[in-house]
Every structure is written in structure tokens, then in C-alpha cells.
């Protein structure tokens, strides 16, 4: 098939737009990377684009000289793993239950869930609730309060709703019970939706520092990486003259900020390609089936 | 089916890990309780601070261990991260208070919530060193006229601090004054002439880029530092924030309304008309400003050292020390004195308090008292004798290898030694105060500052016949003490009319001042009159009268 000139113009336009968007999104990242690897005093002079002018690990050395960073990293990885898996399991189970037409309380539970999307208790009441539940200074506080998110449940439910109901009926005829249907029929088919939600959960867990700040700030064994980095950042930034932290004077806060940005982004960048194929699948799935 | 097994296995694993962690948490709590039960172990007190302390090592550092040994208290500390005021508000509204609280400006929320203990009697009974440290300043510790309790031991302001490092004034590059044979830099005219003469001789740098006469920075609040505060420093007014206060009658004036300051802004307007003022002064961002300074092209600045330090360091790193800056006490006319070092007296303010939930307030006050003692002060500033400093012929000396680690391995050194970590936890003496052995309490003193100067800087200083920049400035003793301290530190409730008016006036000023400076000189008087009229219309007089009440209350609180 020969491409017509209209097709070629179309392709050219599309490719130019794609290239433009790529440059616009990639440049800031490369700039941050270059600045994080450049000598801090030299960076002050400006003019760094995508290559460092005076290569150094100095900025990273500053960050990693804090011993609590390692604990922070462990806790962050752990909470991302546990939080994602538990969150996924509970959201998908609830979603499946809600998708079943024979479930009596379906309407009530749906409305109940939907309400949490619009109404929240506010920070202080939640703080007091968490405290009275005895979850302060515990790992559970990272996972349990956000275990079921209404949004995630609805996304998975609408995906399950889109699966032909006949599949469940035929499984039932073959003698499968509800759990078997869920494990063997629904979950494998919902993988694209689950992958999306998993990514949401994982990114959310990885990036979150506010719950550490609220509930675990005084417990050095349970702080997360983001929280620790926030501390480092703040100490380079805060204070003038008399209070400027003495050890930070050799490195400007800007450079440390850049290095921190890289440190927190890289793990997500590493995970993303593995989940990406599910997104593509999710998008093409419908097209192939019809 | 392998697929099913995989999913089940993952979910199972996750559940198990979850259960395991829950188990761990419980065990930990039990251990803690057991720890508490042991009688000879130190009392663990929780401590909350609004400021970060990244090198906090849980009091397991060398200084920390000595403090625990002497006071029997070990702190379990939390240093707020992110929006500290929010966290403080949360603590106040939750009604459960950490044992010791250093909440800076948010302390009023804790007090309102009934969380803070009045320390007056505790200090009287158990705080001899606290009383000794604050001495006659004890009155300044009181909370307010309505509630004269003492809720905090001030830890942010140092007692009897002597400034010996000049940070402000007007700055000129060393190469400028050297080229011109070190002329007297005393008035704005001298400053202007120096820049002008140098620019005429050297319009460009060695690479052909144009030199810049005077660059100002007006990026957000930097406006105060570089543009508007110098208006009172150069015209004999002390730093009282956005106001000027009559020392006898305490009549408040919005400082821009002083006639002398009009002349200062007229001079800036003139500088712009002459082409000596950087055209980008009012549009540049902080990083552009620093990059410009790092290029070495800016001859003169009006700023504080910490505002341009990064840029100056970059140019010095290239070995171009003659592009560094000296500080000069420039004023509008010969008759006025530069007021940069007009003393404020002891400023009290932010500090550490004991909460009502503290199980042992007497132990807590003894802990704070130890930090105020001579032994405690030397410990937190200098470290452990024989390890971090030695005494030779009655003089405290820091060994070479310790100095080396302080500079090159600073973070780790602080984590291990704890030097610097506890300074902000108790009342403290300022720089330049000597202890009973004749040594300085802090590790910063004039000899050390001179040692930090480079050769070019020393040459310039020698040419002006001084050894430090601060010697060029009028001494603190030359100024009368203001009974209110300094007006910028008088808290104004954010919902009061004064505070709303101040915000309104700020917006007018920040719009008008750049406009006036950049206008043609013939327009200056007309624009200035318009600016004054606009201030009056916005209610500047009501702000002045309203603020006067706050000043008078402060005078009464601190002096009666």
C-alpha cells in the first residue's frame, strides 16, 4: 500500500508534535539530572542545559551522608509493596462483590463508598481518630487507613462490569464457587485494570510523606524516604545568617533539591516499563475482542 | 493452574507480611514499657520542635550522652518537616502535648489550648542557672500583659550577643576601591562616584561583557532587604520593620513617610537615570542575581551577605578574589550614622517550654537549667574536653584534626559529636560573651573571622586601617536602647485591622517604589506625592495609630 501525500503530511505533523512533546517533557528532567551532577558552586553561575559542566557526586554524597536515609528507603519499599498488594486485593474483592447483581446491599455500599470521595472528616478529626485507634507510631498507619479507596474500587468495578456475564455463568455451570470465579475468571481478565490501579497505589505509597509527618514523625525507625529527604531539603533551605546549618554551607540548596528529585524519581522510572505493557494491552483489549 | 497459584501466593504473602509487621509493632511497645519500668534508666521525654535538625542522632552522640548522664533525661525528639505551623496546630487541637515543646510562633496556639505550663515558680525553685543567664532580662520572658506567665525559655535569641561580623551595609568589589586608591566610602555620593569612575575606566570586563554598576534584588521579600530597608539604614532610622518609632513618645510612622527617605529614593532614581543601576534590578529572580554576581561583573551591591554569598563563593572559587565584596557604612549624608548595628537588646521570643502533659516538670526544668549553666553551654558549643577541644594555658583550643573534620566531614561529624545540635534547645549566651575562665562561650570570635579573610580582602581592610569590616560601622554603644527591642519582632494578630492594613500598604509600596525609581527624574516629585496620597487613602494613619498600641504594650510588658 502506497501512502498518499495526505497520509504523509499527516504523519509528518503527528511525528513533529510527538517529538515536540517529548522534548518538552524530557528536557526539564535532563536539566535536573545535569544540575544534580554538577558542582554546586558552579551551578550558581547558571547556563547548565543537559550536560553537567563540572561533574561531581558531591550533591548525592551530601544526601546519602544521612544515616536515616537507609531506614527510610527500607520503609518506603516495604510500604509500597505491602500497601499496593493489600490495597489491590481489597479493592478488587470489593469491586467484584459490588459488580454482582445478586448482592443485596449493592446500592447502599456503593453510595456509602461514593460519599467518601466527596466528604472527608478533615485533618484534625482523622488525626484524633488514628491516635485513639492506637495507630500512632506504627507501620499499620501507612497501609490500613487508605486500604480501600472508593475511586479504585469503582474503576475496577466498571472494568468487571464490562466483562461478559456469561463467563461467570458458564463457570458456575462447571461447578465453580464464587471464590473460584473471582480468582480464576475475573482476576486474570481484569489484569489491565489491576495494573493501572497497582501503579496508582504504588506511586501514591512511594510518594507519600504526609502520613509520616502526621503520625510517625518522632519514630526514627518508621520514617519514610520522602520524609527524610524533605528533612534534608529543609535543612539546606532554612535559616539565614546565624541559623544557617553550618554543614550545608558548601552546597547550595538548589543542587541538593535537584539530586533529591532524581533520587525519588528513579525507582518509579524503573518500575514503570514493567507495568506499561498492561496499559497498552488495556487499551487494545476492547478493540481486538469486538 | 499456575496463574491462580501465583495470585494466591502473592496475596497470602502480603497478608503474612502485614501480620508480621503488626506483631513487630506490638513487641516494640512492650519493650518500651519494660524500658520505662527499669528504675535507673534515664527518663524518656518527648520533644517537639518546629525547626529541622537533620543531624539529630537520638542523643546517642557524644554531647548527648553527657547531657543524659548529667540530667537523667533522654529526649525522643520530633522535628517538624514541611508545614511546621500546621503540625503545631494539629498538636494544639488534638489536646495531647509532647513533654517539651519548641513551637516558635505557634506557641500561642499551645497556650490557648491550655497545653503549656507556667514556668515562673519552677525557675524560681530549680533554675539558678536560668536566672543567672537571663539576669535582668527575666521580665522579657513574660507572655503578655494579660497573662504574665513564663511559658518558654528563649532559645533563639542569644543573651548579650556582640556583633563582630558585618553582613550588611553597601558592598563594593575590592578591585573598584583598589583601582581608585581606596577612597573614603561614606555617603551615597562617594559610593556613586566610585562606581562611576571605575565604569568610565573599565566599561567591560576582560571578555568584553559590560560591567554593571549597582544591582538590586527585588524578588519577593528580598525587596525589603535590598531596596526598602536601606532607606532607613542610610537615614539614621533603626530597623523597626516597616515602621519608624519615636523613642520618647513611641509615635509610629510608616517609615517611607519620613522626609529623609524620599531623598534616598531620589538618589536611587538618579542612579537609574545615570545608567548606573542595573536595568534588571526589579525583574531579576534570585538565581539570576546570583549568576550575575558569580560572573564578577557587578561592581556594587546593597544587600546582606547571605543574600549574595553563593554568587560570591563561585567567583572566589575561580581565584578572582578581587571580585569579592567589602562592606561600607554608607549613609545619605555625612551627618547620619549607619544604623545596621543599632542594638535591639535581648529579644526573648521563641523558645522551649514544658507542657502540662510532662510527667516530671521538675526534672525537665533541671534539664533546661543544665543547658543554661556554664558547663552546659561549653558542652553544647565546644563539645567534650580532651576530645573536641583541649585547654592550653587556660585557653580552649580546637585541635587541627577536629577543625578539619568540622569543615570537610561536617554532617557526619555533627552526627557523632553532637556539637551544634543542642545549642538551640536551651537558653544561650551570644557570640563575644566570655565565661568564668575568660574564654568565649561560642566558637565564633573575631580572631577566627580574620583568619577566614583572603589576601585581597586583608589588603583592602588594611588600606582602610581596620582588621574587620565591622570596625568601619558605628558601634552598638553609640545608639540608645529602644525599650521595645525591635518592632519587627512585635507579634500582630493576623486578623487585626493593623495586619490587614499592613498588607495593603505593602502592596502599594512594592508597586510604587520600583515605578518611582525607574521614572525620569523630572517625574520623581509628582510620583512621590501620588504615592504618599495613595498611602493616606489606604489608611496609613490608622495603621500607625493601631500599631502604636502594640508597641506601648510591649514597652510595658518588658519594662514594668
Image (cartoon, rainbow, N blue to C red):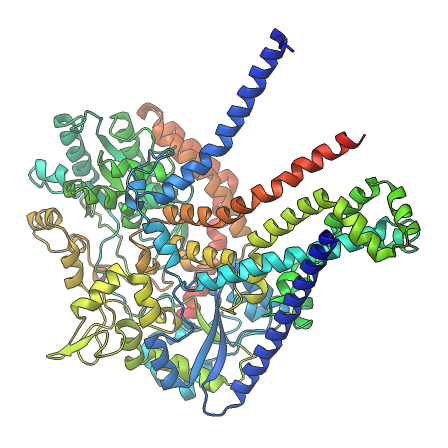
Q: Position of residue B538 (x, y in %)?
A: 51, 40
Q: Is residue A5 left or right of residue B35?
A: right
Quarter occupied by residue B526: top left
Residue appearing at x 13%, y 48% in the figure: B457
Q: Please tell me how many numbered marks the rendered image carries.
A: 0
Quarter occupied by residue B476: bottom left
Residue appearing at x 65%, y 61% in the figure: A143
- Viewer-nearest residue: B177 or A190: A190
Establish if B481 lies above or below A270. Answer: below
The answer to whether one can see residue B134 in this image is no
Residue appearing at x 21%, y 29% in the figure: B211
Q: Position of residue B111 (x, y in %)?
A: 55, 70
- Viewer-nearest residue: B378 or A174: A174
The answer to whether one can see residue A31 in this image is yes
Q: Position of residue A3 (x, y in %)?
A: 62, 10
Q: Quadrant of the C terminus of chain A?
A: top right
Amino acid at each position: 500500500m502506497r501512502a498518499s501525500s495526505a497520509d504523509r503530511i499527516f504523519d509528518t505533523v503527528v511525528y513533529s508534535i510527538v517529538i515536540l512533546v517529548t522534548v518538552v517533557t524530557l528536557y526539564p528532567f535532563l536539566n535536573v539530572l545535569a544540575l544534580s551532577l554538577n558542582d554546586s558552586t558552579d551551578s550558581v553561575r547558571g547556563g547548565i542545559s543537559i550536560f553537567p559542566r563540572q561533574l561531581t557526586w558531591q550533591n548525592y554524597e551530601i544526601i546519602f551522608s544521612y544515616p536515616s536515609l537507609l531506614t527510610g528507603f527500607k520503609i518506603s519499599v516495604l510500604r509500597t509493596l505491602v500497601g499496593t498488594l493489600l490495597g489491590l486485593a481489597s479493592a478488587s474483592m470489593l469491586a467484584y462483590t459490588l459488580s454482582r447483581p445478586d448482592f443485596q446491599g449493592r446500592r447502599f455500599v456503593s453510595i456509602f463508598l461514593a460519599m467518601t470521595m466527596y466528604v472527608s472528616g478533615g485533618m484534625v478529626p482523622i488525626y484524633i481518630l488514628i491516635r485513639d485507634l492506637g495507630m500512632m507510631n506504627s507501620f499499620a498507619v501507612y497501609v490500613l487507613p487508605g486500604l480501600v479507596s472508593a475511586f479504585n474500587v469503582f474503576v475496577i468495578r466498571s472494568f468487571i462490569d464490562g466483562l461478559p456475564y456469561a463467563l461467570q455463568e458458564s463457570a458456575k455451570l462447571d461447578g465453580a464457587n464464587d471464590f473460584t470465579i473471582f480468582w480464576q475468571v475475573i482476576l486474570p481478565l481484569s489484569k489491565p485494570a489491576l495494573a493501572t490501579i497497582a501503579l496508582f497505589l504504588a506511586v501514591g505509597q512511594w510518594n507519600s510523606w504526609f502520613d509520616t509527618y502526621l503520625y510517625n514523625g518522632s519514630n526514627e525507625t518508621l520514617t519514610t524516604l520522602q520524609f527524610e529527604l524533605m528533612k534534608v531539603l529543609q535543612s539546606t533551605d532554612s535559616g539565614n545568617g546565624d541559623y544557617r546549618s553550618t554543614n550545608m554551607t558548601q552546597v547550595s540548596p538548589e543542587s541538593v533539591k535537584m539530586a533529591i528529585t532524581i533520587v525519588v524519581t528513579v525507582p518509579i522510572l524503573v518500575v514503570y516499563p514493567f507495568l506499561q505493557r498492561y496499559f497498552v494491552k488495556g487499551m487494545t483489549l476492547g478493540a481486538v475482542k469486538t | 493452574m499456575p496463574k491462580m497459584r501465583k495470585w494466591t501466593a502473592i496475596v497470602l504473602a502480603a497478608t503474612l507480611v502485614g501480620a508480621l509487621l503488626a506483631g513487630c509493632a506490638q513487641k516494640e511497645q512492650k519493650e518500651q514499657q519494660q524500658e520505662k519500668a527499669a528504675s535507673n534508666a534515664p527518663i524518656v521525654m518527648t520533644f517537639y520542635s518546629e525547626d529541622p535538625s537533620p543531624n539529630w542522632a537520638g542523643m546517642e552522640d557524644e554531647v548527648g550522652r553527657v547531657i543524659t548522664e548529667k540530667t537523667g533525661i533522654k529526649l525522643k525528639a520530633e522535628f517538624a518537616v514541611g508545614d511546621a505551623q500546621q503540625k503545631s496546630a494539629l498538636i494544639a487541637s488534638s489536646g495531647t502535648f509532647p513533654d517539651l515543646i519548641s513551637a516558635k510562633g505557634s506557641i500561642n496556639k499551645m497556650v490557648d489550648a491550655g497545653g503549656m505550663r507556667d514556668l515562673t515558680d519552677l525557675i524560681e525553685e530549680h533554675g539558678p542557672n536560668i536566672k543567672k543567664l537571663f539576669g535582668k532580662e527575666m521580665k522579657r520572658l513574660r507572655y503578655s500583659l494579660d497573662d504574665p506567665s513564663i511559658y518558654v525559655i528563649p532559645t533563639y535569641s542569644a543573651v548579650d550577643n556582640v556583633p563582630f561580623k558585618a553582613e550588611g551595609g553597601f558592598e563594593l568589589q575590592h578591585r573598584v576601591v583598589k583601582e581608585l586608591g581606596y577612597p573614603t566610602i561614606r555617603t551615597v555620593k562617594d559610593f556613586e562616584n566610585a562606581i562611576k569612575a571605575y565604569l568610565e575606566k573599565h566599561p567591560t570586563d576582560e571578555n568584553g561583557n559590560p560591567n554593571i554598576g549597582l544591582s538590586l534584588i527585588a524578588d519577593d521579600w528580598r525587596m525589603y532587604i535590598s531596596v526598602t530597608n536601606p532607606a532607613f539604614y542610610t537615614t539614621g532610622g533603626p530597623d523597626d520593620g516597616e515602621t519608624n518609632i519615636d523613642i520618647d513618645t513611641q509615635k509610629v510612622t510608616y517609615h517611607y513617610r519620613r522626609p529623609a527617605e524620599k531623598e534616598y529614593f531620589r538618589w536611587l532614581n538618579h542612579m537609574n537615570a545615570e545608567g548606573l543601576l542595573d536595568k534588571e534590578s526589579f525583574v531579576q529572580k534570585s538565581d539570576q542575581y546570583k549568576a550575575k554576581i558569580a560572573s564578577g561583573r557587578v561592581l556594587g551591591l546593597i544587600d546582606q551577605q547571605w543574600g549574595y554569598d553563593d554568587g560570591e563563593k563561585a567567583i572566589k572559587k575561580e581565584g578572582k578574589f578581587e571580585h569579592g565584596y567589602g562592606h561600607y557604612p554608607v549613609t545619605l549624608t555625612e551627618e547620619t550614622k549607619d544604623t545596621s548595628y543599632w542594638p535591639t537588646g535581648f529579644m526573648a521570643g521563641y523558645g522551649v517550654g514544658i507542657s502540662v502533659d510532662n510527667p516530671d516538670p521538675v526534672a525537665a526544668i533541671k534539664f533546661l537549667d543544665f543547658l543554661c549553666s556554664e558547663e552546659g553551654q561549653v558542652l553544647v558549643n565546644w563539645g567534650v574536653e580532651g576530645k573536641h577541644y583541649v585547654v592550653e594555658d587556660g585557653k580552649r583550643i580546637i585541635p587541627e584534626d577536629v577543625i578539619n573534620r568540622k569543615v570537610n566531614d561536617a554532617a557526619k561529624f555533627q552526627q557523632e559529636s553532637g556539637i551544634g545540635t543542642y545549642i538551640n534547645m536551651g537558653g544561650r549566651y551570644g557570640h563575644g560573651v566570655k565565661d568564668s575562665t575568660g574564654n568565649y562561650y561560642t566558637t565564633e570570635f573575631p580572631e577566627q573571622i580574620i583568619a577566614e579573610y583572603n589576601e585581597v580582602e586583608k589588603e583592602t581592610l588594611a588600606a582602610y586601617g581596620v582588621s574587620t569590616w565591622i570596625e568601619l560601622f558605628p558601634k552598638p554603644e553609640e545608639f540608645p536602647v529602644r525599650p521595645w527591642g525591635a518592632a519587627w519582632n512585635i507579634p500582630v494578630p493576623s486578623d487585626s485591622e493593623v495586619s490587614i492594613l499592613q498588607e495593603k500598604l505593602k502592596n502599594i509600596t512594592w508597586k510604587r517604589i520600583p515605578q518611582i525609581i525607574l521614572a525620569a527624574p523630572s517625574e520623581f516629585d509628582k510620583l512621590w506625592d501620588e504615592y504618599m496620597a495613595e498611602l493616606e487613602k489606604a489608611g496609613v494613619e490608622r495603621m500607625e495609630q493601631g500599631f502604636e498600641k502594640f508597641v506601648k504594650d510591649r514597652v510595658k510588658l518588658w519594662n514594668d
